[in-house]
Image (cartoon, grey):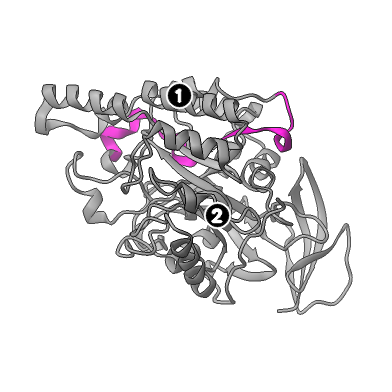
Amino acid sequence: MSSLLIKSATIINEGESFQGDVLVTDGMIKQISGKINEPADKVINAAGLHLFPGCIDDQVHFREPGLTHKADIFTESRAAVAGGITSFMEMPNTVPNTLTQKLLADKYEIASKTSAANYSFFMGAGNDNLDEVLKTDPRTVCGIKVFMGSSTGNMLVDNEKTLEGIFSKAPILVAVHCEDEATIRENAKNFNALYGDNLTPEMHPQIRSAEACYKSSSFAVGLAKKHNTRLHILHISSALETHLFENSIPLSEKRITAEACIHHLWFSDKDYPKKGNWIKWNPAIKSGEDREAILEAVLDGRIDIIATDHAPHTKEEKSQSYINAPSGGPLVQYALIAMLQFYERGKISLEKIAEKMAHNPAVCFQIEKRGFIREGYWADLVLVDLAKSTEVSREKVLSKCGWSPFEGLIFSASIHTTIVSGRIAYENGKVVESGIGERLMFDR
């Protein structure tokens, strides 16, 4: 469609909440006003609904190429738009790992044909591909990903000379997974000696400990300060790490930023006896005290972004023993409404949700004309109904893996309509096959 008019919405944007209309033409926001009477190809009566800027998820694993039995860009991008996520940035630990510019280009080619959401892909850094990393185009690629701690895949960067090279020469933002591998290996050795084959998910946060996370994160911060690197630390999982970050300067001026993920805000170690491997993530979900400290850091500005680390595995894979079950799980479909549940509980404001899930990712990554409800910006928008509940069941999960760690929960809010680059991508409880998302561009 060429034009869309949203009428009488409660608009949540840039720290404000107000009622108004939004006119979209040719994919862009043309006008925002208290009352717009211009004709449009489609009119949405949004009375009683809240209009947010579309969420930008800066950390997903959509598993394509090479791991498409778990997920692919087609299925997971549709789960994303069903959850109000209009743009995603995908990680390089696919098969093969995205360690060359050619392999990076191949992923963009797949997305250009199959993604329901707007997209970007991280260039992967390994121990021996610095020349390829330095070819990355800051204008068209979201960032460089470094695994300073092994997770799914085989991309651990543990060569200090390589890390110095990446941090000193990277042309764009460097996003890091921080867990100290030596500490984890020592912890695992000790637990294996004590429990052998009887290790359980409850031991996961003790093996992949807060100390392991802090040691790696503090090392990364030290490197970034040494080289003035634009550093972004992903999925903060411990109270210790929150003290590494500052809130005394505007986000646009920060050289070191941080992200929190939905699962670390929602679950704690008290959930392992019931959830087991279904909440096994790297870094591990830790104590209730860690969870509260992460939320506090989100609210006071030390942690800048809320994302998902959406990382699906099959039911069969997650049903294995603790040692054999992979880490990660699907989250994009229920991330925004999980945060709206925190609003319902009085823990966060609607304006802060928009800031952490839309505004700040756009600012942090310098995304061109997205992340805000502004005239002249792309129309990435999501209407939510705070009065209509959402029950999570396996039958409703759109991710290819077919399960959710939130199964059995009833959230108090629901996604009404998702608009991606001006086209309706989700409405009336269904994904709308209305076209393909746009490649994200960056003001760098």
Q: Nearer the viewer, residue 180 or 131?
A: 131
Report the residue marked by disc 2. Answer: 135
Q: Quadrant of residue 370?
A: bottom right
Which residue type carries mark 1?
Asp
Report the residue marked by disc 1. Answer: 290
Tell me if I can see residue 245 in this picture.
Answer: yes
Instruction: Identify the element where label 2 is drawn.
Output: loop
Question: Relative to 69, is 406 on the left or the right?
Answer: right
Residue 408 on image: x %, y %? 37, 48
- Does 264 appear in magenta? yes
Mark 2 Cα shell of 10 Å, populated few (<14), some (14-19), many (≥20): few
Q: Nearer the viewer, residue 163 or 399?
A: 163
- Say whether disc 2 or disc 1 marks the residue closer to the N-terminus: 2
In this rendering, the answer to whether 399 lies above or below 124 is below
Image: magenta residue range? 248-275
Tell me if I can see residue 265 in this picture.
Answer: no
